[in-house]
Amino acid sequence: MCLNIKKNQKPRIAKRDITVYKTVDHDEDDTFRTVWYDAIVKIGEEYTSKLILQNDNISEIVTEALHSFSNLEEATADAEDDALVLVKCIIPKGSIYYKGRDCFNNQSYASNKLKYAKIIKDYPNYGI
């Protein structure tokens, strides 16, 4: 996953908890995994990551971070389309983050901390 940001955009520090959304895979054994990196995550747990940027001549891309959707509608569409689990998450107060657009042009965040707060909906795979 990637997050496109403006050239020379400075990271922000969360002054309060920020509600965001994430889609994850749900294995048959009740394990949740991130879609892009297949990392196991648990609801209620907080995770940390480095924030790594790559630059080109026009923009910068956050390549390593904890990525999340900024709005519920885009996250819901992603979950429905790919039969994923929609999760409410929190970027905790004091976290470092960037806001921009992901590689599919969704409004998104990349942060160094992310808490998986609760499941909103599990979209079943009907074998379609």
Image (cartoon, rainbow, N blue to C red):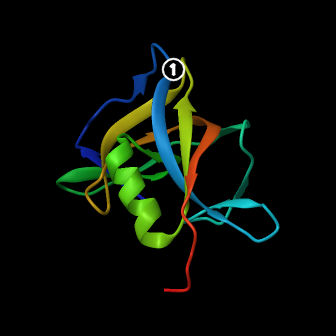
Q: Quadrant of residue 120?
A: top right
Give the residue at x 54% y 18%: 93
Is 96 placed above or below 108 here?
above
Q: Is residue 90 above or below residue 94?
A: below
Would you call the spot at circle 1 few (<14 residues within 10 Å), some (14-19), or many (20 or more)? Answer: few
Residue 69 lies, in percent from the top left, at: 41, 46
Image location of residue 14, percent across then percent down: 46, 20
**Which element type, helix, strand or loop, lies under badge 1?**
loop
Residue furthest to the front? 126
Q: Which residue occupies the extreme top position in the image?
A: 15
**Viewport quadrant of the N terminus:** bottom left
Q: Where's residue 48, x and y in %? A: 65, 38
Residue 7 in the figure: left or right of residue 35: left
Which residue corresponds to the image point at 63% horizontal and 39% vertical from the top-left? 118
Q: Residue at x 73, y 37 (%)?
A: 45
In the displayed orientation, state which residue is furthest to the bottom: 128
> As drawn, is 16 to the left or to the right of 116?
left
Count the numbered circles shown.
1
Of residue 56 and residue 78, the one placed in the foreground of this image is 78
Three-letter amino acid code of the residue under disc 1 = Asp
Q: Which residue is mark 1?
A: 17
Q: Is residue 106 above or below residue 112?
A: below
Which residue is situated farthest in the left direction here? Answer: 58
Q: Residue at x 58, y 69 (%)?
A: 124
Q: Position of residue 82 (x, y in %)?
A: 47, 71
Q: Quadrant of residue 103?
A: bottom left
Residue 17 seen anywhere in this rendered image of the structure: yes
Quadrant assignment, res 29: bottom right
Looking at the picture, tell me which residue is in the foreground, 122 or 67. Answer: 122
Q: Can residue 54 be seen from the camera position used here?
A: no
